[in-house]
Image (cartoon, rainbow, N blue to C red):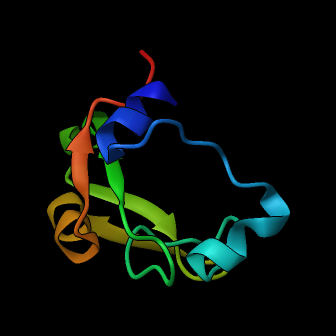
Amino acid sequence: MARLAEAVGAEKVELVPFEEAQKFSGYPPGGTPPVHHVNIVKVVFDRELTRFNTIYGGGGSTNKLVELKVHDALKLSGGTVADISTR
């Protein structure tokens, strides 16, 4: 979480409780796509994702997935790449 906070320029970041997630992203938990969020301003992709050509994310509901090319997901989300995962 400290690496993510640094990547977005925040002092601290926290996970949103499951039951509150939809009010931030506009999508139900498990259905949040990697792009086109309602209330999310900053999107961070872990650098490990750039090893892949495509990624999968929520498709807007809990029973759909979307496949996107990594560079398209970054472009459409306005996201940045940072080393945030633990290895």
Q: Is residue 27 above or below residue 15?
A: below
85 or 2, which lies in front? 2
Q: Quadrant of residue 20?
A: bottom right
43 or 30, which lies in front? 43
**Residue 63 visible in rendering:** no
Q: Residue, x 57% and y 75% (percent of image)?
A: 25
Q: Residue, x 46% and y 71% (percent of image)?
A: 40
Q: Residue, x 43% and y 61% (percent of image)?
A: 56
How many marks can you see? 0
**Residue 81 visible in rendering:** yes
Image coords of residue 2 (percent x, y): 46, 26
Image coords of residue 78 (percent x, y): 22, 69
Image coords of residue 72 (percent x, y): 18, 70
Image coords of residue 84 (percent x, y): 37, 31
Residue at the far top in the pictured view: 87
Residue at the far front in the pictured view: 11
Q: Is residue 75 above or below residue 16?
A: below
Q: Residue, x 41% and y 43% (percent of image)?
A: 10
Q: Quadrant of the C terminus?
A: top left
Q: Quadrant of residue 49?
A: top left
33 or 84, which lies in front? 84
Left or right, 37 with reference to 14: left
